[in-house]
């Protein structure tokens, strides 16, 4: 055989050329080749090729390689809290519009049905509340006959007293929008703590007050007379969270639309 590097004659059993010192490799087909300058990884691949081929992959270090396990735990906890905060932040700002009982309103999607009838001051047609961890929205709907009982009378043609009461009720209905809200304004201003009138016009009464029956709460109430119904809406939150949810309260009332 002849060395492929220097051309010197070599024996079949030689593994190194005695003339130039290069390594001699025997391929599968028994041909003689030089393995000059081959890295250990490449040499392994060439040898492995005789057995069907083996792929050698370099193992890369992870981003946490060499870091203190306690520090890794702190980082993972911080990432988890950040993700939770972002999810809560996005969810808390989502809104949903409900259309029920003759009106529609847009509320935070986090608000759910709760049983609370504390704002129902008279027998109502409907009383329903929604709440989350920050505030509560309640609506109560009264029939006009609850406010003017005389209208519920069904007088006989020959019952003079009943007829007189019924028509007195009809007269009250004509001025209900102004008289009723004025009466409520006077009553609430005397009875409610920190009562603050916002609006009293055309059958609409809006005001705020502090409810201290159980805890110190801030309440913003909206009472409106539409045809033969009296709609009462209230938004309640803890007084110390008033500034935080004030914008949301304004958004809710701006979205409120009663079918007329």
Image (tube, helix red, strand yellow):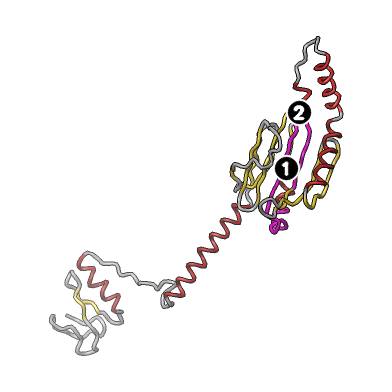
Residue 54 vertical position relative to residue 220 in the rendered view, above or below: below
Q: Based on the displayed image, in which of its 4 quarters is residue 24 positioned?
A: bottom left
Q: Image point 60% across, 56% down: which residue?
A: 89
Residue 80 position, x and y percent, is 50, 63
Determine whether label 1 and label 2 are within 8 Å by CB.
no
For the residue pair 155 and 27, the one nearer the viewer reads as: 155
Residue 117 position, x and y percent, is 64, 40
Residue 137 position, x and y percent, is 67, 44
Q: Please rate how many residues cluster around mark 1, counting C-alpha atoms within 10 Å: few if below 14, some from 14 to 19, many from 20.
A: few
Residue 57 position, x and y percent, is 33, 69
Q: Based on the displayed image, in which of its 4 quarters is residue 124 positioned?
A: top right
From the image, state whether disc 1 or disc 2 is nearer to you: 2
Residue 94 left/right relative to 225:
left
Residue 76 vertical position relative to residue 210 in the rendered view, above or below: below
For the residue pair 152 and 21, the one nearer the viewer reads as: 152
Look at the image and give the residue range highlighted in magenta. 220-246
Q: Secondary structure at mark 2?
A: helix
In which quadrant will I find the C terminus?
A: top right
Q: Image point 84% across, 18% down: which residue?
A: 164
Q: Image point 81% across, 9% down: which residue?
A: 158
The answer to whether residue 130 is magenta is: no
For the residue pair 231 and 5, the one nearer the viewer reads as: 231
Residue 236 vertical position relative to residue 175 in the rendered view, above or below: below
Q: Based on the displayed image, in which of its 4 quarters is residue 179 positioned?
A: top right
Residue beneath disc 1: 255
Residue beneath disc 2: 144
């Amino acid at each position: 055989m002849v060395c492929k590097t220097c051309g010197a004659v070599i024996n079949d059993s030689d593994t190194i050329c005695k003339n130039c010192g290069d390594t001699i490799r025997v391929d599968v087909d028994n041909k003689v080749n030089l393995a000059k300058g081959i890295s250990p990884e490449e040499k392994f691949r060439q040898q492995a090729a005789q057995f069907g081929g083996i792929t050698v992959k370099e193992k890369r270090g992870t981003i946490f390689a060499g870091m203190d396990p306690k520090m890794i735990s702190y980082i993972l906890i911080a990432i988890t809290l950040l993700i939770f905060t972002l999810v809560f932040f996005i969810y808390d700002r989502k809104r949903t519009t409900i259309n029920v009982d003759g009106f529609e309103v847009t509320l935070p999607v986090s608000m759910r049905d709760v049983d609370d009838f504390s704002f129902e001051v008279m027998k109502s047609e409907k009383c329903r509340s929604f709440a989350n961890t920050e505030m509560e929205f309640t609506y109560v709907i009264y029939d006009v006959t609850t406010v003017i009982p005389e209208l519920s009378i069904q007088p006989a043609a020959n019952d003079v007293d009943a007829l007189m009461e019924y028509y007195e009720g009809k007269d009250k209905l004509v001025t209900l929008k102004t008289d009723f809200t004025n009466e409520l304004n006077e009553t609430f201003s005397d009875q409610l703590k920190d009562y603050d009138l916002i609006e009293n016009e055309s059958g609409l009464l809006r005001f705020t007050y502090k409810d201290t029956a159980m805890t110190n709460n801030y309440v913003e109430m909206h009472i409106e007379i539409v045809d033969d119904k009296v709609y009462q809406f209230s938004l309640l939150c803890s007084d110390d969270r008033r500034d935080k949810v004030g914008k949301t309260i304004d958004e809710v009332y701006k979205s409120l639309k009663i079918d007329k």
